[in-house]
Image (cartoon, grey):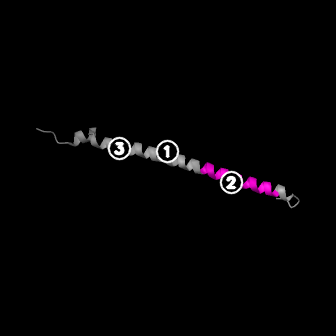
């Protein structure tokens, strides 16, 4: 800040800088929380889907199984 500014103007600028930092930090925290929730949801869906697939026989499993003769 320039030296020629009044004390009130410097205080107002400092307060504005502090408020903008807090607003930016809050935005980043909300984004991080949203990404964490999206990650948890997608991993839950992927892991649940994989567990279902393991119980169902696949085409490769049927070919590899010995035929009853």
Who comes first in sequence, dot 1 or dot 3? 1
* Badge 2 element: helix
Disc 3 crowd, CA 10 A, few/some/many (<14, 14-19, 20+)? few
Residues marked 3 and 2 touching at CB (< 8 Å):
no
45 in the magenta segment: no
Query: Which quadrant, please, contains the C terminus?
Result: top left
**Could you say which disc has been placed on residue 21 in the image?**
2
Who comes first in sequence, dot 1 or dot 2? 2
- Range of magenta residues: 10-28
Q: Residue at x 62, y 50 (%)?
A: 26
Residue 12, by quadrant, is bottom right
Q: Residue at x 48, y 47 (%)?
A: 39
Q: Residue at x 83, y 55 (%)?
A: 9
* Badge 3 element: helix
Q: Position of residue 7 (x, y in %)?
A: 84, 59
Per the model, the C-alpha gap separating discs 1 and 3 is 18 Å
Query: Which quadrant, please, contains the N terminus?
Result: bottom right
Horizontally, residue 5 falls left or right of residue 45, namely right
Q: Residue at x 41, y 45 (%)?
A: 44
Q: Nearer the viewer, mark 3 or mark 2?
A: 2
**Could you say which disc has been placed on residue 38 in the image?**
1
* SS assignment for the magenta stretch, majority: helix
Horizontally, residue 29 falls left or right of residue 65, namely right
**Could you say which disc has been placed on residue 50 in the image?**
3
Q: Nearer the viewer, mark 1 or mark 3?
A: 1
Q: Position of residue 38 (x, y in %)?
A: 49, 44
* Badge 1 element: helix
Q: Position of residue 54 (x, y in %)?
A: 30, 44
Horizontally, residue 60 falls left or right of residue 25, namely left
């Amino acid at each position: 800040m320039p030296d020629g500014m009044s004390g009130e103007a410097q205080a107002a600028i400092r307060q504005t800088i502090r408020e903008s930092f807090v607003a930016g930090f809050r935005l980043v925290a909300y984004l991080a929380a949203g990404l964490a929730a999206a990650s948890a949801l997608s991993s839950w869906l992927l892991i649940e889907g994989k567990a279902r697939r393991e119980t169902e026989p696949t085409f490769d499993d049927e070919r590899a199984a010995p035929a009853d003769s």
